[in-house]
Image: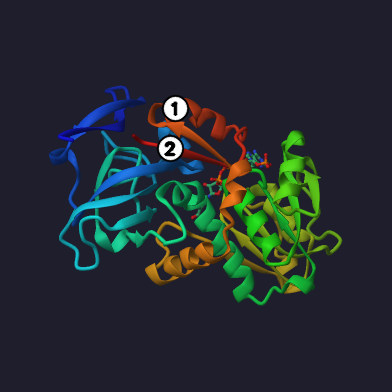
């Protein structure tokens, strides 16, 4: 394939960005020591920001979005990879500052790649994607902080989204009692099928609350931020742990230090983008061992390359359930 399809984000003289499906040649690709034939990519929340021109970290144009990719090595100058190897990539600025995965080919640094676990094909890896790998980083953070299933209930916010869906399923499988928070009235059954024991309405969390509330949560995975995260921390039990990874409600955190200094609550920040290779490999190994691919029947929707552009506003509006998987071919 001499030329290949890619989503291109371009910026005009007035500063407006536009996303379209275009074509690129191999020579258009940025520097990197591994050339990959991409099979599948995804639309994460950050990709939706990029596709709608709202990602502040994207400052160079044209840019190929797509923070995730999975496929096969075409050729490699990296000692760890050879032609034919199955690989995946999450983050490292790919799809923000370096051409990303919403294309049929990519050239990347071999140090950024993760060998595709034997348990997964490329589509499954992308159905999990950055959202699922981040969910596992959150679950592992709770584990490393010593939160055990017998300690009490674990709250998952943004539960019907990508991070939330995978976190709900993984925690339930580990034996935690998961309480899911969602704004989608018609997805309570979906969340219970993933293992949530109870589903709560988002409105109970998204408005300003008290500095401290009745203690309920032994732990939490929050992908929402803002008042929601503040309210979660205010109701976290003595010594509880909250893993915070997202900002679907907002980047602010309007709260007091009361949960920290009066209840010894721990807030753990989770970053998937620059996460060191050893922790990524551990997260993907745990996903290979624990992620039940049957969950994807309800969690994942396959779309084409051009559809990714059309669906991005729906993602930002919080209207998409689970994960969007992009067949780039
Ligand atoms: P999704 O769009 O799939 O899910 C987000 C979910 O948040 C929605 O489905 C909705 O769930 C809920 N939500 C949306 N808008 C609001 C709102 N205004 N108030 C409260 N809840 C809302 O996104 P992802 O799961 O891919 O990502 C979630 C967040 O995590 C994003 O902010 C993303 O940037 C961040 N993230 C961070 C990473 C990191 O490395 N730190 C990695 C991956 C994601 P429901 O309807 O069920 O309430």
Q: Secondary structure at mark 2?
A: strand
Disc 2 residue: CB within 8 Å of ligand 1: no
> Which residue sits furthest right?
214
Q: Position of residue 33 (x, y in %)?
A: 18, 57
Q: Is residue 51 left or right of residue 264?
A: left
Q: Say if 273 sits above or below 302 in the image.
A: below
Task: Name which residue lies at 28% across and 58% down.
Answer: 85
Task: Name which residue lies at 52% across and 57% down.
Answer: 134
Residue 200 seen by the camera: yes
Q: Is residue 182 left or right of residue 140?
A: right
Front-lying residue, 258 or 307:
307
Q: Position of residue 30 (x, y in %)?
A: 19, 46
Tell me the quarter of the image containing the N terminus: top left
Q: Say if 38 sits above or below 2 in the image.
A: below
Labelled disc at residue 307: 1
Would you say the residues marked 2 and 1 are in contact, meaning their CB atoms lie under 8 Å apart?
yes
Labelled disc at residue 162: none
Q: Secondary structure at mark 1?
A: helix
* Mark 2–mark 1 distance (CA, rounded to whole Å): 8 Å
Q: Say if 143 sits above or below 62 in the image.
A: below
Q: Quadrant of residue 77?
A: bottom left
Q: Is residue 103 left or right of residue 143?
A: left
Q: Is residue 283 left or right of residue 88?
A: right
Q: Quadrant of residue 51?
A: top left
Q: Quadrant of residue 301?
A: top right
Task: Name which residue lies at 47% across and 43% down.
Answer: 46
Task: Name which residue lies at 73% across and 54% down.
Answer: 195
Residue 249 seen by the camera: no
Q: Position of residue 315 (x, y in %)?
A: 55, 34
Q: Which residue is mark 2?
A: 326
Q: Say if 258 sits above or below 155 in the image.
A: below
């Amino acid at each position: 394939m001499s030329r290949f399809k890619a989503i291109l984000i371009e910026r005009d003289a007035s500063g407006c960005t536009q996303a379209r499906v275009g074509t690129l040649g191999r020579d258009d690709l940025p520097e990197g020591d591994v050339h990959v034939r991409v099979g599948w990519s995804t639309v994460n929340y950050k990709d939706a920001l990029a596709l709608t021109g709202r990602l502040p970290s994207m400052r160079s144009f044209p840019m190929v979005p797509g923070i995730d990719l999975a496929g096969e090595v075409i050729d490699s100058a990296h000692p760890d990879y050879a032609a034919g190897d199955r690989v995946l990539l999450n983050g490292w600025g790919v799809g923000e500052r370096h051409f990303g995965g919403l294309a049929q080919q990519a050239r990347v640094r071999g140090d950024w790649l993760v060998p595709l676990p034997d348990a997964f094909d490329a589509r499954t890896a992308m159905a999990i994607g950055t959202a699922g790998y981040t969910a596992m980083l959150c679950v592992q953070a709770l584990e490393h902080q010593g939160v055990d299933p017998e300690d009490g209930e674990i709250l998952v916010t943004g539960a019907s989204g990508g991070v939330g869906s995978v976190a709900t399923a993984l925690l339930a499988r580990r034996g935690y009692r998961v309480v899911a928070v969602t704004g989608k009235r018609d997805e309570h059954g979906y969340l219970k099928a993933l293992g949530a024991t109870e589903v709560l309405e988002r409105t109970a969390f998204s408005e300003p609350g008290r500095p401290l509330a009745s203690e309920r949560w032994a732990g939490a995975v929050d992908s929402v931020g803002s008042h929601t995260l503040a309210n979660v921390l205010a109701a976290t039990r003595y010594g509880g742990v909250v893993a915070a990874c997202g900002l679907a409600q907002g980047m602010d955190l309007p709260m007091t230090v009361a949960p920290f200094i009066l209840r010894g609550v721990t807030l753990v920040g989770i970053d998937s983008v620059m996460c060191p290779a050893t922790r990524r490999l551990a997260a993907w190994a745990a996903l290979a061992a624990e992620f039940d691919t049957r969950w994807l029947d309800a969690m994942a929707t396959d779309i084409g390359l051009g559809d990714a552009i059309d669906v991005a506003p729906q993602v930002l509006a919080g209207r998409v359930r689970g994960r969007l998987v992009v067949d780039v071919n």
